Image: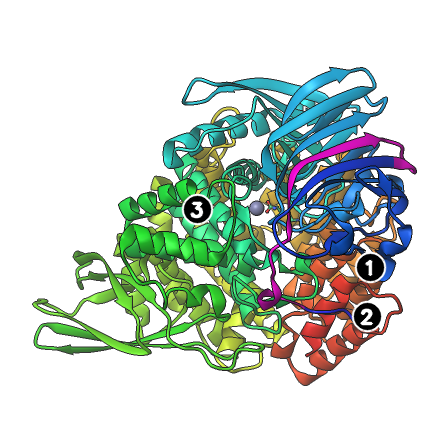
Amino acid sequence: MTATQYLSDWRPFPFEILETRLEFRLDPNATRVRSQIDFRRLEQGDLVLDGVGLKTLSLAINGQALDLSLIREAEGKLIVPAVSLPDSFTFEAEVQIDPEANTALEGLYLSGGIFCTQCEAEGFRHITWYPDRPDVMAPFTVTVHSDMPVLLSNGNPVSVESGKAVWQDPWKKPAYLFALVAGDLRAIPDSFTTMSGKHVDLNVWVRPGDEPRAGYAMESLIRSMKWDEEAYGREYDLDVFNIVAVDDFNMGAMENKGLNIFNSKLVLATAETATDGDYERIEGVIGHEYFHNWTGNRITCRDWFQLCLKEGLTVFRDQQFTSDMRSAAVKRIHDVQTLRARQFREDAGPLSHPPRPDHYQEINNFYTATVYEKGAEVIGMLKRLIGDDQYRKALDLYFDRHDGQACTIEDWIKVFEDATCRDLTQFKRWYTDAGTPRLSMTEKWADGALTLDFAQHTAATPGQPDKPARVIPVALGLIGPNGDEVLPTTVLEMTEGQQSFRFDGLGARPVVSLLRGFSAPVTVAREVTADEQALLLAHDTDPYARWQAGHDLALDGLIARSNGDEGGAEFIRAIGGVLDDAEADPAFAALCLALPGDEEIATTIAASGTVPDPDAIHAARRALTLDIAKAHSDALSRLYDAMAPRGPYQPNADGSGRRSLRLACLAYLSRLDNAGRAAALFAEAENMTERQGALEQLIAAGRDQQALAAFEAEFRDNRLVMDKWFMVQPLRAASDQAVARATELAKRADFDWKNPNRFRALIAGLTSNHAGFHAADGSGYDFLADWLMRLDPVNPQTTARTCSAFETITRYDAGRQAKAKAALQRIAAMPGLSRNTSEMVTRILA
Ligand code: ARG
Ligand code: ZN
């Protein structure tokens, strides 16, 4: 049994650190780490240091050896009693660690021969003894001895010679921001001059041969640095900024001070090997990690319960950045889609937790859509409520007041209260309460007045039975029956469980364009006719609300069909209008053309209290797709041709918008021509976006053999591209063949399952094939459980994250539930199961 950590148990660390000095002698199996840490007492208390899996060679205080029996191996602590400590002292340790044996990719490890680190959240304790908590900050000096050609750490280089490098980071930082890299790497160099005229050397470090694929990452970095100056007045603060790409990485990337380490899939891109989606993510994540320099590093978190303080804010900032670089409307719709697919799903099941949780067993299980994406939505709501100017004022105050500190959500809220003179007590519930509020609206129309009655309700979540009302910013507009806007966007502030708003002096009854811009992360229940939705889809001035109207129309039709009723006729008709206007805004048209996925349909059905049938849902979506294709074949075919490439590939909003529309048309047309156009496109396409899009249609049509072989022959040696090959097969295979397909692929010698990207490609490909994963015979659940049990001893973090594929099981019928539970119980019963996976499985089974 593992102990639960509680927010209420937080106590300050009784010492401060004046300086941390580290000296590494790198060796694949026997790396030596010597540390010298200058402590000064702040209050009474023992010195408690964290350390896990260390071979401790020596410990000393002020040169006096310490007894190794002070180490409590089982707890991962070293406790030096207060009585034996002076007020100021230097703690010294020498430990030995084994990077090559580190398959968990936490701490110091080897990736393809490159030494690298991942210390967030609690990886530093795998490197040496330290107060491994974010509120203990110190300047670091790091010496690295190694014969590797490139030796990097945080901060500025002090001396770099062959076999030895010294790095100094003048900015106080917690241990989770420590990084070290040593390897045979090549740089894409560039530079940046900050707004106050400081010169910064920039490098993106990759393996020899990958240099031509790193240019976009560098351009993205420069755009990020400029944007943070313009949008937030934030300047970079060191002489160098390094980014390193590694192939083995549990997450996307890491914001270590001055030395960001990235999963190579978020750095390397060329038109031939990366899709538009990959390019957009690279730009967004380069931005995200760079923006952490202020929101995360200069101002960090007091404890890990406050994770959304840095992650919610930094996601919000990277979303703003992407909207400014690309299309704000398209970005908003994408973000809403992601939030619904990942966060609403999480919030509706056993893993539901607030953006600021108050307990956990394993913090790595809380790098979730709720902490990140909902954390960002909460900031968006704050901004909507107080306005742009007040938001900027509050952020300036935040940077002013808290620079150099480790903060809490309370500090953050207080900044907004002080800057705006508002009481945010009720607003704070968005941080502390889990669950997605359901906002319902009914309308009354009389004598030119429209009365809107709103009610909010949030269902109980684990450990939180009662849900008081929240502040909900409801942005709305009114559209007259002729399509004219009669009320521009107005933000209503709902604070009660039930509340009415009245609009007078209206000539004719308007249609409400509700929750414009997705002004709050809530689900909406309202009575609205198909004609009204069609009117909004045609005339709403808010792009998100327009898209949502069409999306709801499609969803209604799909749900009716999955129940065996008629449905979708209105959507089929409305799509005609979208196709007519498509060339004016291809990216938006592509979004409108894309039907809700099976998972979203299932979620919507489950939310209405009905048991979703994965096979019926899948059949309904296929049938509606075919009907749309038949009804609009001419327009689809015309647009498909019109969206053909015009000139060389550009990974920008314009180019990707055209390609997304082309591929949306292709998905329909492939149902009419047995993927004939897809076969032609696959053969002639010069960019991966079209190539992969075509391949997916060929797989769905069951005529993929040649294309898969050609793809493999061409990209066999490119790990990132082969990840796509592994992913799209189980994803697009017919649902009754998906598990068999995944099973076959998993037998291949190049299914290098210890690499998190490769593991996730295959597994997430399958679990994202809704009807395939939820096969009634339970084969999808068993396949997943078998692989989780295999991976857990090797890499607990990636295993635990993947468990969330099971978080929706209670929605389904008793047969599926029983099979999924049996699979989970098999995992739970595994001897030596990691704390990470054990917590996830226990919560899901609770
Ligand atoms: N702070 C990183 C980011 O969001 C995430 C690192 C999390 N890593 C982990 N093993 N939990 O940018
Ligand atoms: Zn982050």
Residue 752 position within the rendered picture, expressed as x and y whole percent measured from the top left: 84, 46
Task: Say which residue appears at 55% left-offset and 67% top-offset.
Answer: 345
- The image quadrant that residue 836 belongs to is bottom right
Magenta segment boundaries in residue numbering: 5-31
Residue depicted at 8% across the width and 67% down the height: 507
Q: Residues within 10 Å of mark 1 (few under 14, many from 20)?
A: many
Tag 2, which secondary structure?
helix
Q: Disc 1 marks which residue? A: 792
One can see residue 670 in this view:
yes
What label sits on residue 331 in the rendered view? Answer: 3
* Tag nearer the camera, 3 or 2: 2
Q: Nearer the viewer, residue 511 or 41?
A: 41
Residue 827, labelled with which disc? Answer: 2
Q: Which three-letter amino acid code belongs to the residue tagged 2?
A: Ile
**Residue nearer the viewer, 404 or 836:** 404
- Kindly check if marks 2 and 1 are in contact, taking CB atoms under 8 A apart as contact: yes
Label 1 C-beta lies within 8 Å of the nearest ligand 1 atom: no
Q: Position of residue 150 (x, y in %)?
A: 76, 22
Label 2 vs 1, first from the N-terminus = 1
